[in-house]
Amino acid sequence: MKNIYLETYGCQMNEYDSELVRSILTASQYQFVPSIDLAQIVLMNTCAVRENAHQKIYHRLDELKGMKKRGEIEVVGVLGCMAQSLRKTLAERSPTVDVVAGPDSYKKLPNLLTAVYENNNHGFDFALSEFETYADITPKRIAGINAWVAIMRGCDNFCTFCVVPYTRGRERSRSVESVLNEAYRIESEGFKQVTILGQNVNSYHSGDDDFADLMHTLATKSNIPRIRFTSPHPKDFPRKLLHVIAENPSLCKQIHLPLQAGNNTVLKRMNRTYTKEEFYDLVDEIRMIIPGVALTTDIIVGFSGESDADFEDTFDVMEKVRFDSAFIFKYSERKNTIASRKFADDVPEAAKTERIVRLNDLQRQISKEINQTEIGKKVEVLIEHRSKKDANEWLGRTDQNKGVVFAATGKNPGDFVTVEITSATTNTLIGRAVNVVPKSSNILSLSR
Ligand code: SF4
């Protein structure tokens, strides 16, 4: 039996895929270990969304090359989106890289490893499938509070900056029944929160059921206390879903709505197929139907051709919408995307930097102001783990996905606690547990 050390980079979909990989290879007599020192095989589940993600993997491959030379490990594998998008480059890196497997090739991993060990060959497979959903694989989860379920794979939207349609292929959905069965399993394993994943969850469909129907089924048939989802596309956000969220307490009042840019010309060049006016209308509707909802977003600054005036439009939309938080990135051209073929990456690095700094400053101020409106409120918090700054305190999350730090005795990860918010920073709410013995007791001795 060989030991595998698996490193996961990138998004929650990759975390989920790593659970599939663990399941597939454990069934084939491999075992996963928590330290590279115990492993003969190192697998990296990679991300291709930004250039720095690639650089990180290349740097890691250099380290692994040294380990291989010294005989500390035997086999190196690159899985996931980067494996798909850079298969030729990775193949050229042989003999450091022995196994390359794209996102639809995980079931072949046992054979690919056999090819390496028994036939002294490489194990490369990156065929994309129109059908593979891994619905028949039970993910091997690490016990905890949070679980993920991918309900669909691939993307047909072809936003011009995005590599995902090329690395993950065409959209395909799992059946409602298979998603529900996975939810039942998650519930029985004691997870308290599940995040439903898809590149564009709005596109989910199974028979006559759309995404809103699926969420309604999950909320009404499973007993998972908190259900989230990511990501919906603003172009076709299902209005029916807003009512489903408003009416079902287990569906969290938090929506991640990637804006990407606030200028209509830039949005058109990105092929996002909505305008900023349509985005405003959607935000108004969401806030009307789900009062108190938290909205978060993704923004790209410095996309091809983005002028100073175009950027000011994005700044303006951010000021008007007032998201609870935002992930803001500089545009980084990805090979083989439509943007890389049609447009130049022509915004100077200095301008990108200035824009990201300005937007981050704005967002920090807005996030802090929004968080400060929580002071004095009593909120329900799901405890996740100890606070990194003070082991006597817990870090938990509200329904709106805001981090809350507080002290409480007799509580454990997975418990729900009512917390009164006493202060707030840009990223965190601070509070005191209500009806729980206060901090002075020795909570370090609690079992975890
Ligand atoms: S919706 Fe656009 S940004 Fe999202 S995965 Fe698909 S192509 Fe990429």
Image (tube, rainbow, N blue to C red):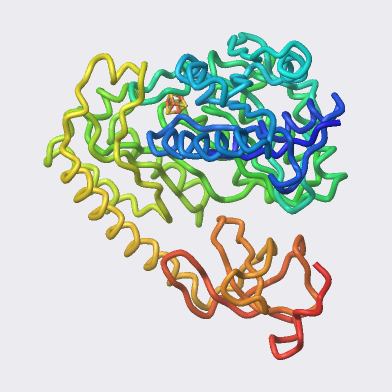
- Is 2 displayed left or right of 386 in the figure? right
Residue sitting at x 55%, y 73% = 377
Q: Position of residue 187 (x, y in %)?
A: 82, 44
Q: Where is residue 446 in the image (x, y as percent from the top left)?
A: 81, 76
| Any part of residue 380 in sight | yes
| Quadrant assignment, res 188 | top right
Image height check: is 419 above or below 251? below
Looking at the image, in which quadrant does ligand 1 appear? Answer: top left
Who is closer to the viewer here, 165 or 64?
64
Residue sitting at x 63%, y 67% = 395
| Any part of residue 215 in sight | no
Image height check: is 174 above or below 373? above
Q: Where is residue 147 in the image (x, y as percent from the top left)?
A: 71, 44
- Is 336 displayed left or right of 438 in the figure? left
Image height check: is 1 above or below 401? above
Q: Which residue lies furthest to the bottom in this view?
A: 440
Q: In which quarter of the image is the C terminus?
A: bottom right
Tally the numbered discs: 0
| Quadrant assignment, res 325 | bottom left
Q: Where is residue 295 in the image (x, y as percent from the top left)?
A: 45, 49
